[in-house]
Amino acid sequence: MATVAHTAGEPRSYSGIWSWITTVDHKQIGTLYLFTALIFFFIAGTEILIVRSQLARPDHGLISADLYNQLMTMHGISMIFLGVMPLSVAFFNWIVPLQIGARDVAFPRLNALSYWVFLFGGILLNLGWFTGGAADAGWFAYANLTSTTYSPGDGVTFFALGLLVLGVSSLAGALNFTVTIINMRAPGMSLMRLPLFTWMAFVTGILLVFAMPVITIGLVEIFFDRYLGANFFNVAAGGDVILWQHVFWVFGHPEVYILILPAMGIVSEILPTFSRKPLYGYSFVVFSGIVIGFMGWTVWSHHMFSTGMGAVADSAFTVTTMLIAVPTGVKIFNWIATLWGGSIDFKTPMYFALGFIALFIIGGLSGVSHASPPSDLQQQDTYYIVAHFHYVLFGGAIFGIFAGIYYWYPKLLGRHLKEGLGKAHFWFMFIGMNLAFGPMHWVGMDGMPRRVYTYPTEMGWDFWNLVATVGAFTMAISFLFFIYNVIVTARSKEKALGDPWDARTIEWSIPSPVPHYNFAEIPTIKARDDWWVTKYGPEEHPTNESAVSDPGNEDEGDHHDIHMPDPSYFPLVSALGLALMMGGLVFPPFLQMFGLDIPIISVVGGVILLIGTYGWAFEPVNG
Amino acid sequence: MSRRLLLIVGLSLLMTAISCTPSHPQSTFDVTGPIASGQRDLFSLMFWLAAVVFVLVEGIFIYVIFRYRRKGNEMPAQHHGNTRMEIAWTIAPALLLVVVMVPTIQKIFENASPPDNSYEIAVIGHQWWWEFEYLDCGPVDCAGLVTANELHIPAGQPVNFTLVSEDVIHAFWVPKIGGKRDALPVPKNSDGKLDLVHQRANQLWLQGDVPGEYYGQCAELCGVSHANMRLRVHVDEPDTFAQWVSNQKSPNSLPSSTNPGYEKLTTLCAACHAITGTTLTGVIGPDLSHYGNRGTLASAMFDNTPENLKEWLRDPGGMKPGNIMAGSVKPGTLSEEEIEALADYLLGLR
């Protein structure tokens, strides 16, 4: 690349805005993912604060019914596709190559493409806000509410196009990490020595590879119905609205595990580190993760008990759904057994990891009560369900993700987030979360449906809705502590050590922040928890004298012999082309030709995509 | 210790007080009839089992994190696991789940088909109101009776509902009588009526045992006024029900006065609304036969008072977002004199 002067084969130090635009380095891409996803996460959080303000009082007129539906829909979509998923991907990027002893992912430029497509897809998804209204049919967008008859604005079109674009990002990322984990492990890193986080990233990758095509088909159907007048979901023309629900949930339920498995992986790393004990029942935790991933495909219709599938189907999905609680339980028991007899150090990451366990148990137990259709028919589409999935997705996934942020921040960014602010963040988030979602169990069982923009006072839901709103704002405050923490940390001069937590896996055996080339020398893996064994030996009763010194925070200097992938801006060009091509389908100008409306912006986008992929394919390799 | 106990008892009492003082018209606990109580009992079983598991697991968890907190710089033994423990905590939850699974599947099949003596009522969801068409009430001659938003059923009598939708997916839900079921859109037959025997036409049977007025509402997001798509179910004594049916089937009459409001009734209103015995036969909006007997207005959004009704006739769009009546009745469409006359007439339909 002409833009970065260097001698052949020399790993360069990268800085400045141009380095971020052209980066193919998994750590930088991970950082981009993290901060972009956090911004989307805060936008989605703000959306729900407005919704909670509306629901704080009965018959409240703060926002219109129409705006409520948009905010509620975009909150759900954004949290899932622009918040939790990319936050997990941020950790795949940051951690997976480090944990398997690799210098980068298998396809570094594809990795950059995933990020840029994610960024543009996220923007595309939100464009409805600026063109007369965002998507308003709920995050699972049940047909035929998504048809042009019932959702005439462009919001649902942007929903379909945005998710189609994001699907490219997820699929490319999933393939990339699956291949990376299979092919790029350091010598000796057998599958059963893989750190748990990498294992769960592996399972998640496989789930994504199979799940994304399913939702893609559904979204194409929605789009064809809206854009080309197809009749997939047009009942009058023989279409079927239940088709969408099956397609959506065949994707949607594995998606739930796509959201939670990475967080489970993170927690499975943090608990052993801060208990100074290996993960209890490693192989059982691994296999329960695999079993969850597999069984996640067999339970989708438990989202559809109210659609009238019949007694046999209802019973079958009851059995599979209840069974999936077993491997989930196995994980929880093993986590508690890991703590048992340990030496628990209460650092901020550990707070969040322990919060994860405490809250996930609640979400898991409430889940059983809607695995039973007769009971579920009173809970389906009520706030009880909202409570349940926020205990697993907020109490679970988000707590796990923040545990991971506090845990790996020093490793990747070279500085510690402040402990005091971190703990304040935890307590506000923990208390706020229980205030917000705890009472929803009650109002749901008291008959409050979800997705209602208002409720009359005679229903008796006033008090607990007010409490829930107070809880939501308490959580909002907790994130102010986090943002402040990030700012303070960025200004601080204190550098992190290489192994500040006395951890167990090999990413802690190298300096913090991680040098560009990760490992000066590719390690040879001798054991599970290899870094711990290096420090303390394989004994069951080790002394607490470490055999090696801390890897420190100094880059060891030039390693001219290390070949690293070259930076490239073609992923960005290609991603931009793809997004323009898709988004242009909605925007004028259109050119009348051959009796067709040719969308000019899409054509331009297609040309850019072509240039991007051409340049990519023929990009000269330096070194 | 006793102080803490007192605090806990006090707090729980406070919470119970807060939860119990206002009325709870859509509670799934305070229910009537075999369907809702069966569903509640199953939930209770799971709740108490879950409560035991919760106390046990969270208890152990909290014990462990306090008991094993790091005091100095101690180095614990590096235990890697125990296969027997793994087998134990795989099997124990599985057994517990079987305890839930068996009654669940029993209940699924029990609730699947309605008793032979069930009455038959079709429920048709519209954006955003409910249409009820009585098909068969055994000894009571109800066939052909159409009403909207307020359903009457006799106490102690199983009723089988056929659920369909005119437009998008709705879900019919009266929590105190039973769990919800979706009303899915179905195509129309050649006679222009929705196909009630289509494969997507759902069945749900319910039974209310204690007479009274029960609240319900749509449970599936169905567009802008989803929150306003409510309904009431009147569980009547069998005699009262029979009287209601015969009254409902008796013709209404148009007033003979020459007030200009009545002209609007037979022109503007007749396009969408029907009133039995009159020239109003529209099928787009709710049937208004014997409207004066209804307790609510605009699919159970408001009490059916003269003030609310007049306000509705003045500006329906302002009272219920998105409703299609607002397309033809805007503020100013009807004069105050016409509104007065129409409200008088409608409330007089008894």
Image: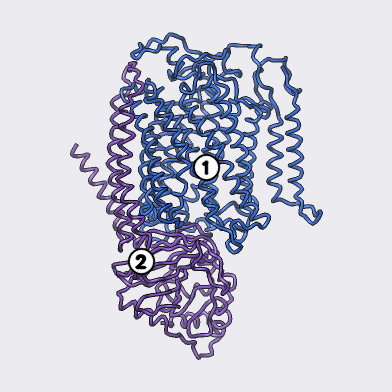
Q: Tell me what hue chain A is rendered in.
A: blue
Q: Tell me what hue chain B is rendered in.
A: purple
Q: Amino acid at mark 2?
A: Tyr
Any part of residue A443 in sight: no
Task: Please tell me how crowded label 1 is: few (under 14), some (14-19), or many (20+) other residues with Cα within 10 Å.
Answer: many
Q: Quadrant of the C terminus of chain A?
A: top right
The answer to whether residue A209 is left or right of residue B131 is: right
At x 57% / y 44%, what residue is drawn? A214
Q: Is residue A254 above or below residue A178?
A: below
Residue under pointer 1: A79
Q: Amino acid at mark 1?
A: Met
Q: Quadrant of residue A58?
A: bottom left
For the residue labelled by badge 2, is the local secondary structure a helix, a strand or a loop? strand
Whole-percent x, y for residue B181 in the image: 43, 59
At x 52% / y 52%, what residue is drawn? A245
Q: Is residue B349 above or below residue A307?
A: below
For the residue labelled by badge 1, is the local secondary structure a helix, a strand or a loop? helix
Whole-percent x, y for residue A524 in the image: 52, 13
Query: How much space separates mark 2 and mark 1, taking CA atoms?
Result: 37 Å
- How many marks do you count on the picture? 2
Task: Please tell me how crowded label 2 is: few (under 14), some (14-19), or many (20+) other residues with Cα within 10 Å.
Answer: many
Q: Quadrant of residue A213?
A: top right
Residue B214 marker:
2
The chain ID associated with circle 2 is: B
